[in-house]
Image: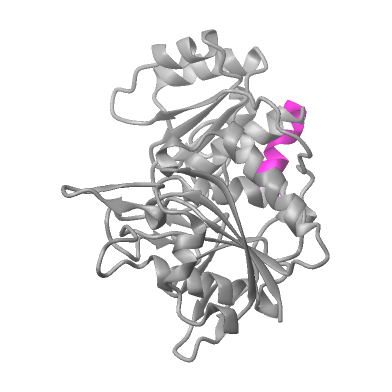
Amino acid sequence: MKKVVVVATGGTIAGVSNGSGYDSGIVSVDQLLKVLPDFRLIATIETAQSCNVGSQDMNFLTLQKVAIEVQSILDRSDVDGIVITHGTDTMEESAFFLNLVVQSSKPIVFTGAMKPSTAIDSDGPANLLDAIRVAVSHDSFGRGVLLVMHRVIHCARAFVKSHTTSVDTFISPENGPVGHIIADDTISFEYDTPKVHTYLSNFHRGKSVILPRIDIFYGCTDMNSDLIRSSVSLGAQGIVIAGVGNGNVNEAVLGVISELTRQGIPVVRGSRVPMGKIVRNLEIDDDSVGTLVADSLAVAKSRVLLMVAVGIGIPLTDLQQIFYDY
């Protein structure tokens, strides 16, 4: 029987109702497993409690420790796959970070819940059981980091949270999910994971380091530019813009961006629009301004990619290709 290690980081799946709402990251991973029916028929399970926080409090120091722990587990010959329980608020960033820095072809499966463990209709147990199913599936190998919730399988690069409270909150806006778990618990993949990931990545990190500060700014009507300049003065080593439309910004912001890129500060144009690629040199002359485009990568993940790339010293001239490749 295959062995899966369940690594817990907290979140709503480990939450407990408090009367008016719930507190995240209370229940241990072993307590979560106790309510699962017949999981021992699917895999031999080992557990690790990496941390226990609501994902709104996840930070990159903790996340790097999780990545190092996951890498160490996957390097073991007796382990066939790994499941990571995580809060849904920042799961897309954490999953994408591991997709960049963990080098293994073994299944790495995130899961979580939208309702706490003490809710009568908690979605956590079913999601966790399905994540274990995907982690032991031979078809999951070599697909990078995956998310399994609500019987749907997403790849880390593509999925985003789309609803504040719905149990099927996660979607992959551009191409849809990569697979599903169908009625008889069969794992069905529709297409391969796009772009470079995990064992193909050049971003492997063997230790925790201080990643550079990268700030995001949201594009809007009559957008101000002063905070962008202030961000760099306070230590930001890169900027990501959630621009309007095709990642566009007004003239005031464009002027500041041009100043920053001449100073060697990378500026990535993403979009507040949920679907579509950012096209270079369409309305903004990226070649002249010096800006990078996020391609089809979501803004929050563009920040993660820029942090990792700048952190390991990728030259500014190579960063655009990084966004196309990853």
Residue at 67% across, 17% down: 264
Q: Is residue 186 magenta?
A: no
Left or right relative to 61: residue 72: right
* Residue 326 appears anywhere in the view: no
- 74 and 311: which is toward the camera: 74
* Residue 315 appears anywhere in the view: yes
Residue at 43% across, 19% down: 253
Residue at 73% across, 70% down: 80
- 81 and 152: which is toward the camera: 81
Please provide percent x and percent y for residue 275.
43, 54
Please provide percent x and percent y for residue 31.
45, 61
Q: Is residue 319 magenta?
A: yes
Image color mode: one colour
- 79 and 160: which is toward the camera: 79
Please provide percent x and percent y for residue 77.
83, 65
Q: Which residues are drawn in magenta?
A: 315-326
Left or right relative to 49: residue 35: left
Quadrant hosting residue 83:
bottom right
Q: Locate the N terminus and report the quarter of the image it occupies.
A: bottom right
Left or right relative to 151: residue 263: right
Q: Residue furthest left?
A: 20
Q: Residue furthest bottom?
A: 184
Q: Main secondary structure of the magenta part?
A: helix
